Image (cartoon, rainbow, N blue to C red):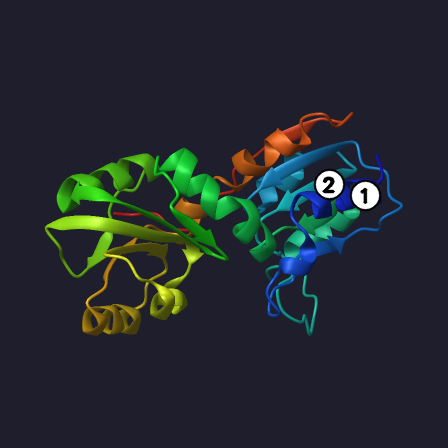
Amino acid sequence: MRVGEILELLDGISPFELQESWDNSGLLLGEESREVSRIVLSVDIDERMIDEAEEGTLFVLHHPLIFSGLKRLLWNEYPANLLRKMILKNHSLVAMHTNFDQTHLNRYVFEEVLGFDVAYCEGFVCMTEGDWESGALLKRIKEKLGLERMRIVGNRERIRSVAMTTGAGASLMDDIDADLFLTGDIKFHDGMKALSKGLMMADIGHFESEKFFAEALAPHLKNLPIPVIIAQSINPFTYI
């Protein structure tokens, strides 16, 4: 298949025009007329994945490898070191980032992974209502996401509403009307602000909350005439 055909299909699944103004989703490497032999889906990309992939592979990633303007390409620096390897193997690259967050990923993680019934889903935020004992609910969320630890801001005995944004969504807290807000990459001053607002937050990790990207996208590509492979990039963080 040609890259352009796949790009058109992906745009139909999650329109690229929905991406945020600061984002860089779409075709980032290659050309629409290029023929590709297979598709690899992953949150991110690393050297191992590139080395193991057949020549002419199209990578569809959640995170844009080229995110902001590149002022130089030095082959020993990220991301130029990965781009060089990809160019030499005639790889192509498409990113589906904030557009896919809004149309698919947040809802998939909230419903399919965490098991919540969605009462409200708009933009980057999913929300549900119910009645849970706080400790039991947080333990369940940790287990579902495979978290070794989870940082918590604030405390409530009972939770009657839960909101979630995958990735780094703390900047959205002013729009959250819930007892508990789940998101990743919560910074110190985010925590201080949440405390002042009386908002309980749980840091569910950036990678850990978005690692389901390939699982969420793959069913929409199952009828393609070329193989679609789910891969999992490395998490740069370890815990001791």
Residue marked by disc 2:
58
Q: Nearer the viewer, residue 123 or 230?
A: 123
Q: In the drawing, what numbered circle is on residue 129?
A: none
Q: Is residue 145 left or right of residue 11?
A: left
Occupied quadrant, residue 172: bottom left
Farthest right residue? 33
Give above or below for 83 relative to 174.
above
Where residue 200 sits in the image (x, y, percent)?
22, 59
Depth-wise, is mark 2 or mark 1 nearer the camera? 1
Residue marked by disc 1:
3
Q: Would residue 211 be visible to someone looking at this image? A: no
Q: Quadrant of the N terminus?
A: top right
The local crowd at label 1, few if under 14, some if 14 to 19, many if 20 or more residues have their Cα within 10 Å, is: many
Give above or below for 226 relative to 158.
above
Q: Earlier in the sequence, mark 2 or mark 1?
A: 1
- Callout 2 secondary element: strand
Where residue 102 sits in the image (x, y, percent)?
54, 53
Residue at 26%, 73% (x, y): give it. Answer: 193
Q: Amino acid at mark 1?
A: Val
- In space, the residues marked 2 and 1 are separated at their CA atoms by 8 Å
Where residue 18 sits in the image (x, y, percent)?
63, 59
Q: Amino acid at mark 2?
A: Leu
Q: Is residue 65 left or right of residue 2?
A: left
Residue at 34%, 53% (x, y): give it. Answer: 163
The local crowd at label 2, few if under 14, some if 14 to 19, many if 20 or more residues have their Cα within 10 Å, is: many
Residue at 34%, 66% (x, y): give it. Answer: 173
Q: Would residue 151 be visible to someone looking at this image? A: yes
Residue at 27%, 41% (x, y): give it. Answer: 142
Q: Nearer the viewer, residue 193 or 132?
A: 132
Asked if the residue at tag 1 contacts the one at tag 2, i.e. Cβ–Cβ closer than 8 Å, the answer is yes
